[in-house]
Amino acid sequence: MQENESEDPKGDEAEEESAQKKLQEAKQAVGVAHFIVLKADDDNTKVPLWLITFTDVMALMLTFFVLLYSMSVPQEDKWKEMSKGLTQKLNAFNAADYRAGTQDVTSLDKIATSRALSIGYVKVVLGRLLAHKNINDVMLIENQKRLVISLPSDLLFQSGQTEIGDSGRQALFELGGVLTRVKNRIEIVGHSDPRPITNSSKDGYKTNWQLSLARAAEVARTLKDVGYDREIVVRGLSSARYDELPKKMSQEERYALSRRVDIVIMNDGGYRLNAFDM
């Protein structure tokens, strides 16, 4: 059985129109693949598609490195050492743990000062000087932060007097030659025994505190005369040393040890450092 197929011109036209329509849509799709049209106000800005892909890759790489950093474990000891060093250079008040604290509890110990010679080295130099010059009865007392040169009053003064004798001037001349060559800060501290002053009308000193302060000031003035040109802090402590001596010592020994003038050599230079000086 044979069927005659009749051709429909209208059907062919419909198919051709449909093909043209699909071709047009494909061209539009290709155009969209190349450019994305963004409307900003009245201007049309075309952004290449590769730029969006590149931005996505950069964002993924940044996320990757952030994850790596968050999972890393830094060495705490080296980190603290580095942080401590940087802080010490930039801020003198928060440089180390012993300096930590609020402003209300900040003391002089927290202020960074200039460095000076080692206390142990200064003690060795002074010890050799005293032995070479036969200066006796002078004690050198060392601790971590200071060296005390304790001079007996018998070497410097007569009883109840503030004028330094010849032997005392010679001893201070020798000591001053060393002190002028070191950068360490020094203080002069005067001491006396607790016995009342009996010749106050002659010198004008009514208390042992006045006498101890005057003697310390006289030692400081003598050091200035022999060439020491830096500032000197002068203190008078009256009979404070006598009260600290052991009770088992005899009364005369306690009196002799309490009548002294101390030259205190500090372990710093006395100059406060700024952040850019360290």
Image (cartoon, rainbow, N blue to C red):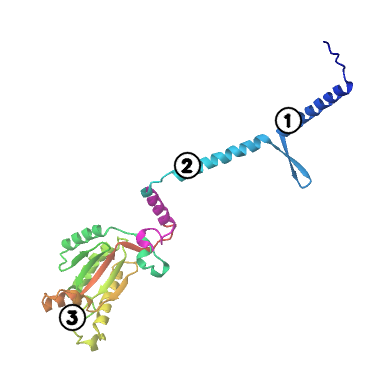
Answer yes or no: do the residues labelled 3 and 1 have beta carbons within 8 Å? Answer: no
State the residue position of label 3: 159
Residue mark closest to the camera, 2 vs 1: 1
Residue depicted at 39% across the width and 53% down the height: 85
Determine if the magenta segment contains residue 161: no
Answer yes or no: do the residues labelled 2 and 1 have beta carbons within 8 Å? Answer: no
Please tell me whether mark 3 sits on a helix, a strand or a loop.
loop
Q: Does residue 176 show up?
A: yes
State the residue position of label 1: 30
Residue depicted at 22% across the width and 67% down the height: 149
* Farthest-out residue, bottom: 201
Q: Does residue 278 show up?
A: no
Badge 1 density bin: few <14, some 14–19, many ≥20, Cα 10 Å: few
Give the alpha-carbon distance from disc 2 to disc 1, as whole Å.
Answer: 40 Å
Q: In this image, 146 relative to 45: left or right?
A: left
> Where residue 193 sits: x, y (%)?
19, 79
Please tell me whether mark 1 sits on a helix, a strand or a loop.
helix
Closest to the observer: 100 or 137? 100
State the residue position of label 2: 68
Tell me the kind of residue under disc 2.
Answer: Leu
- Where is the N terminus found, in terms of image quarters? top right
* Farthest-out residue, front: 1
Please tell me whether mark 2 sits on a helix, a strand or a loop.
helix
Highlighted range, magenta: 78-100
Dominant SS of magenta comes to: helix
Closest to the observer: 270 or 138? 270
